[in-house]
Image: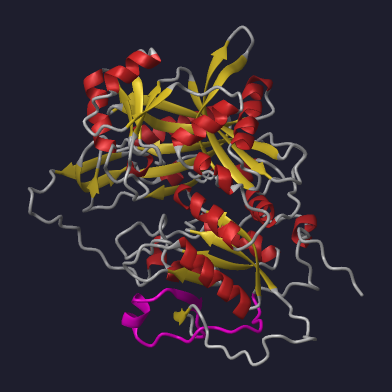
Amino acid sequence: PEAAPHPTAPPTPADSLDSTEHHEALMGATYKSPTAADKNATVTVMGEEGAGELRKVIATEFVSKPVQLTSPPVVLQNSIVLIDPKIPEVKYTIDAANRRNLMVTAVIPQPNDGTKNFVLHPTTAILLEYGVHQVYEPPVGVKFDVMECAYHLKTIEAQQNLRFLGVIPCRESSVDVADMLSALLGLRNGNDLGLAGARRDKGLMKVAVANAGLRVAKYARLTRADGGEVELAVEELELEFPIVVKTPRGWSTQDVYICNDCQEAKECVSKIVKSLGPDGRKTQYALLEEFLTGEEFAVNLVASPTTPRGVQVTDIWRYHKIFLHGTMVNTWQSMVDPHDKAYASLVRYAEGVCRAVGIKYGMAHIEIKAEYDSKLGRWITPAMIEVGARMAGGRKSVMAEAVIPGWYPFAAMVDAHCGFPVLIPPSFRPVKQATHVFIPSDKDGILKSISGENFERLPTYYDHALSAKIGKRVRKSKEIGSFCAHLWLTGTTEEVQRDAERARAEFIVEVDPLPEEGEAEVAAPAAAPASPIEEIPSPEPAAAMPNAISVV
């Protein structure tokens, strides 16, 4: 008899079906009533007429012979699970999955009811149009239950003859969900649940990293809602102002404050403690931290036992920030060469952080502060700000693929989570300068007009995303989500620097005053798109990959 395939071997035509073809499976009945569908968990698939069909998660099934001495071999369809995917990254992930004959199942813990940005929170219809095969959603208005989701996915796996190979978190808030689902589905290539807290809670991640012998900022957990512990914490930690106050489980610079005195720190602690955090959970404490000197970097890695060191640094970005509105605000972020000896300490430190918090499979994004030693010509004394066990946001992976020959981060992410060998290029040295520019608003009000948004005029233009809309409110830009637009540039260092400064200087917004309390915002009349996906620009198709990767 033929030997059983190795559990971590990539799928081959002999043991995997083309994901675009129908495979024998039991599918739940279609809901005829939208009201009934809203009250139950659903799986949505693309119907014959191109529209999404809402189906029951579990199909009616009659098992007359629970035990059979002999049974015909079942051909399983390999599949991956994406937790809370977003645009445009999902397109690149689907392309990588299709090249591996993997079916894509998406899980949306908090479905978009039409009030959220369709790019950051795509609906089921948008995901199906992008190529996701089926989408799981909890009942409308019901809090997502990871255990119930796991039960449903295991039932889907059995009834549809699927074999889930990996669970991939697509944003910071889905990291712990992916860890738990991976374990509940019985996958061996999941990250250690014992360190799950260290991959999400900024206090616990400091404990894990410090226990590994790596430098972290001095910190305190403050639990009093009135901020009454601030003076004692500053004294005990022997801190000098400014200091940092932040929420323990945030992202995208939300609820992060730079405080110049105790009173300011007390007010910020009061905003955080006992309030709802960015993840929707009640925050029990605030972190008060030492303000680290130096420059900020983001180090991105891929983790897999198939890489030479278990973790591999793929790209490094230097953050350019200014102090504004009580915090450090992004202006742009530029890719640097990870092979440059000047960044060697950042590479070693980031690898150590990745191991300390238990990231063994998938992508990692680590934010670090370091100081430059002009005598040595190197960055020294790195210290972690935070770590995320997922692919970096801000289209950093899209840009890395564009400027690093032979590097396909989305394919690597899929392979790492499925336990397949990860293809590493000979070098991660970028051939062009890649920069992410943050286009701000300096006003607060109802947007009346925009000028300078035709970013295609810039010689180094690569892509952009404009989030500000006429008739909607804009705020003075501080957090990443508050910027009017995001711009990506590639070219020489001098050309990109020139275009980044020009784009920010020439972007001007005019606003009307905010309406008085009780008055509604009046949006400018505009034709509603036939489908939300019309508002989303389709990303350029990923570059053709070599045959070696296509085979994998």
- Please check the rendered image and state whether residue 47 is part of the magenta-colored stretch, yes or no: yes
Asked whether residue 499 is in view, the answer is no
Q: Is residue 353 left or right of residue 435?
A: right
- 244 or 295, nearer to the observer: 244
- Which stretch appears magenta? 20-48
Residue 31 visible to an observer of this rendering: yes
Where 323 sits versus 274, above or below?
A: above
Describe residue 486's horizontal placement relative to residue 75 as left or right: left
* Residue drawn at x 48%, y 70% as measured from the top left: 136
Q: Quadrant of the C terminus?
A: bottom right
Q: Position of residue 94 (x, y in %)?
A: 59, 62
Which one is nearer the viewer's eye here, 68 or 124? 68
Furthest residue toward top: 375
Q: Which residue is at a point 65% across and 55% down the rendered structure image?
A: 414
- Membership of 97 in magenta stretch: no
Q: Residue at x 45, y 86 (%)?
A: 30
Q: Where is 373 relative to 184, above or below?
A: above
Q: What colouring style does the render use?
A: secondary structure
Q: Would you place residue 237 above or below residue 172 in this image?
A: above
> Can you say whether 49 is above or below 313 in the image?
below
